[in-house]
Image (cartoon, helix red, strand yellow):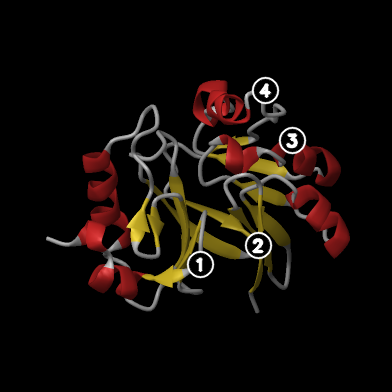
Amino acid sequence: MLRISTYTGGIAQTNGYLVNTPTDSFLVDAPDGVADWLRRQGVKVSHLLLTHQHFDHVQDAAAVQREHGAKVWAFAPFSRELTLEFLMGFVSGTSFAVAEYAVDEVLEGRDAIEVGGLTWKLAHIPGHSADSVTFYSETEKLVFGGDVLFAGSIGRTDFPGGNLEILLAGIQKHLLVLPDDTRVLPGHMEETTIGEEREGNPYLEG
């Protein structure tokens, strides 16, 4: 049985998800503070899946990789251009840099991966970030959506590399085709379902 615990932390209140299966434990995204949280949980994770590499989703990636020996899987290799860390420095007024980690498996070009004894179908949906990827389990009826689709909203497109048309097209092509009861576990705020967003998300009307 799949068990998912949510950690929310960092300046942007970013969600990280600890996924426990009968055979494994892994993490989706690594916001600030999640490494300490995992220590308190007493859990070891085998993998860290990144929905994208904006700084608020990867601040603890290096710590998780180091402390757990976790394999980091992401759409693209580590890049300071992708992290947008300069925005954090601008907001805080101080020098800021994400601790560098190694992407062990680059997922560009892959349709699916096997983690935790489950198949996760991949969809590359740029528009918020060039490397945004979603992880969908058909058997578990859930998708880790990162900052692509939120409850009543969508990812911001006013960052470098953002594009509203591309983001909306990707959501229509890859997410709105999923069953209505598919749970969406986003990078921020509460979870939702595909059906709720298809019916009530103002950004997806028309």
- In this view, the residue in front, 162 or 49, is 162
Per the image, the residue denoted by label 3 is: 62
Please indicate whether residue 162 sits to the left or right of residue 131 in the image: left
Per the image, the residue denoted by label 2 is: 116
Between discs 3 and 2, the one toward the N terminus: 3
Vertical placement of 155 versus 126: above or below? below
Locate residue 148, reporting x and y percent: 39, 50
How far apart are the alpha carbons under marks 3 and 2?
A: 21 Å
Residue type at numbered disc 4: Thr
Residue visible at 59% across and 41% down?
56
Quadrant in which the C terminus is drawn:
bottom left
Per the image, the residue denoted by label 1 is: 190
Between discs 1 and 2, the one toward the N terminus: 2
The image's mark for residue 94 is: 4
Q: Residues within 10 Å of mark 2 (few under 14, many from 20)?
A: some
Q: Residues within 10 Å of mark 4 (few under 14, many from 20)?
A: few
Q: Secondary structure at mark 3?
A: helix
Locate residue 139, reporting x and y percent: 48, 74
Residue type at numbered disc 1: Glu
How far apart are the alpha carbons under marks 4 and 1?
A: 30 Å
Locate residue 196, reporting x and y percent: 32, 74
Camera-side mark, 4 or 2: 4
How far apart are the alpha carbons under marks 3 and 4?
A: 21 Å
Camera-side mark, 4 or 1: 4
